[in-house]
Each structure stands twice: as C-alpha cells, then as structure tokens.
Amino acid sequence: MLKGIRVIDFTNYIPGPFTTLRLAELGAEVIKVESPEGDPARHNGNGVVFRAHNRGKKSIVLDLKQEEGKRIAFDLIRKADVLVESFRPGVMEKFGLGYEAVRDIHPTLIYCSITGYGKKGKMSQLGSHDLNYMSVSGALTQLKDKRGMPVHPSHTFADYIGGMAASERILAGLVSRGLSGEGSYHCISLAETMASLMTNHVLLEKETGYPNGIQVLNGTVISYGLYETKDHGYVTLAALEPKFWRNFCVAIGRADWVSAHYSKPETENPVYCELVDLFKSKTREEWSEFGQAVDCCLTPVLEAGELAEYPVFKEKDFITDEGLVNMYGDHRGAVTQAPGKGEHTKAVLKDWLHLVDEY
C-alpha cells in the first residue's frame, strides 16, 4: 500500500524504529540514518532490540555534526515523502534540518517528531523513559498489586503505543497531502499518547470519584478475571456478557452459577471459592482447549516463547522461526533481517543522489 513512499528515519531505540517498521511492512522504502557510532539499540541485549525493530530498512551512516553529513542529509530529505526524528526538541534545528528549514524547499514533506513531552513547555527538554511516561499519564497507577503498589511492567507500553500513534499521524499526513497537495508537521508526545488511553478513567473519576475506570473490567466480578491453574499457570476468563457466562456455566455443568455472574471475587462468595478450585483442577493447556471449544471468552496467559504455537498466530505464521514478529496479521510485509550499520550508504546515495565517490 505504501510502495513508492520514501521515508527518512532519524530515530533510535524503540518508538521511532517501531513507527517506521510499521511503515516498512506496508511497503514504504525506509532509509535509516545512523551516526558513525550507530543506533545505540545495536548494543542493547546483544543487538536484539535493534534487530527486532529495524528489519526491512536500509541503513546509511551520516555524521550530522559535520557539514558534509548535513548537506547530504538535506539532499536526501528533498527526495523523501516522510521524515521521522526522535531527537530532543531543538536538535534537528541545530543540524539545520528542522521543519522550518526544509519546508520552503520541500512543502509536500510529511515531517514527524517523536518526543517525550512535546516540542514546547516546561518539561519539553527533560529526558525520560517509558516508565516515566507510564507514571505521569496515569496508566501505571492502574497496574497495582494487592497492597496498592504500582507494578513495574516488563513491557514498554509507551514506546510501542507512541510508535503506533506516530505511524497513524504519518499516514493521516499522507492522506491529507493526497487531498490538498500540502505537506504537514506532526509532533507526537509519548506522555500525551499514553494519557489519551485514560479517556474512561478521567471522565469517570470526574463524574463519580471512582479512579479505576469501568468497574466490571478491573477485577471486581468473578466472570471477568485471572485464575490460577493446576500446573501454576494462569488463564483469563472474560465472560462479561450473560451469553458467554451462561455458556461457561453450562459447559462445566454448573448452570446454578448463572445468577452469580456479577458477584464479587471474595472468600465470602461460595461460587467464587468453587470457581477458584475448579480452575486449579485442570492444567492451563486443558483450559486452553476448553476455551477453544466453548465460546466463553476463556484464554491462557501465554509467555513470549509460546506465542508462535498458539492457533491465532500459528495459522498465519505471525511469528517467524527466527523470532521476528509481523506487524499485520492480514498482510505479509517486509519480514527480513535488520541491516548492518551503513550497509546501504553507497547504494542509497547512488540511487537517490547519483553520488558514487563523493562520500
């Protein structure tokens, strides 16, 4: 769908590379501009972080601290449809590559900056990471243990959700350009993106004082929760609608539980106690098979290494034998290896700028 679209990628680590990975798998040609030292993600986890997010792209090395590197970058931008950058606000301007500098010579460019807190404002120049964006957005306080302490996630949600928001805005920019013929500038704030997920929570808290969103979705009813299995695994039961709860109750031979649909998961509730014991009577795999046979919203809690064999992913080869994860289940994209640092410098400069020996 994006064949013929050229993207210049000045990003590192996760949010920006995830943004352009999604564009690459839709067919865009993504040129990843790396410093002479390379994307720092090349050195995280034996290069896993880099390889996970940069497949299907072309890598070139430019030293933006040198005039020659800036000049070549500027010339490449003139040939691009999209520019994505994730430096701190003001850095691209110092390189002479800010939006104002390139807009006059390339008015149809879609320019996207990925930031922590936006381009302007009190916090715009502060360094932060995913855990910070989770905390200030209110998302982290929704993940608490039984003591009420926020749980440290083992997933960087803001990085990935921010990347999806950035790719969304870029695509919207391309659609707008197709209608108006004009380019546009977009600034994505990871903190704001995470806060945008708090729509239910903020409005409910304002109107009712309840801070934890939709109550039946946060572990307050027995039909929507987590349960431990015989082999110390876990399953999720999300039989929120009456039909799913009825299907579950009938399938396990406990139609008498139907009326307990929205009862509380408390030790004083005999149905809940029996439900806990029931789930502990079978293994996670047995419950997984049950959930695939009975339409009751019952699924296993899977570990990362188990995804490839789960039916919904296995049927589509969603995860490759090498451990690469597709971006779109209904579309086979650029699932290839990530590039070596500067692997495509000469080829890109030749194809785009007709330079051979100059750099």
Image: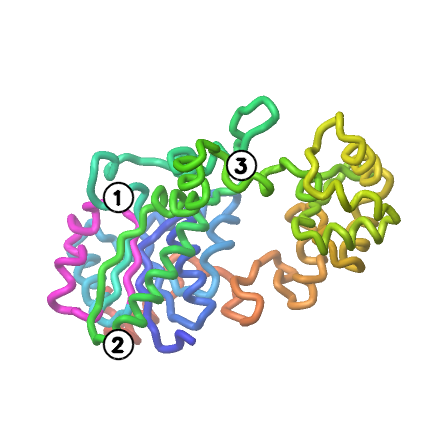
Determine crowd level at label 2: few under 14, some 14-19, many 20+ residues with C-alpha closer than 10 A.
few
* Magenta-highlighted residues: 82-108
Residue 251 is situated, as x and y percent measured from the top left of the image, at 84, 53
Quarter occupied by the C terminus: bottom left
Residue 125 image point, x, y percent: 24, 37
Q: Nearer the viewer, mark 1 or mark 3?
A: 3
Asked whether residue 103 is in view, the answer is yes
Residue 76 shown in magenta: no
Residue farthest to the top, as pictured? 147
The label shown at residue 179 is 2
- Is the residue marked by circle 1 packed among few (<14), some (14-19), or many (20+) residues within 10 Å? some
Amino acid at the residue labelled 2: Leu
**Spatial distance from mark 1 to mark 2, Cα to Cα?**
31 Å
Q: Residue at x 79, y 58 (%)?
A: 294
Position of residue 16 measured from the top left corner of the image (x, y, whole percent): 37, 53
Residue drawn at the location 84% of the way across and 39% of the way down? 278
Instruction: Depth check: give the residue in front, 37 or 144.
Output: 144
**From what the image shows, is residue 102 above or below residue 128?**
below
Q: Which residue is mark 3?
A: 153
Task: Compare marks 1 and 3 and give the one earlier in the sequence.
Answer: 1
Which amino acid type is marked by label 3?
Answer: Pro
Q: Which mark is residue 88?
A: 1
Q: Nearer the viewer, residue 283 or 244?
A: 244
Q: Is residue 77 left or right of residue 247?
A: left
CA gap, disc 1 and disc 3: 25 Å
Number of residues whose C-alpha sits closer than 10 Å to that of mark 3, classed few (under 14), some (14–19) or many (20 or more): few
Q: Which mark is residue 227?
A: none
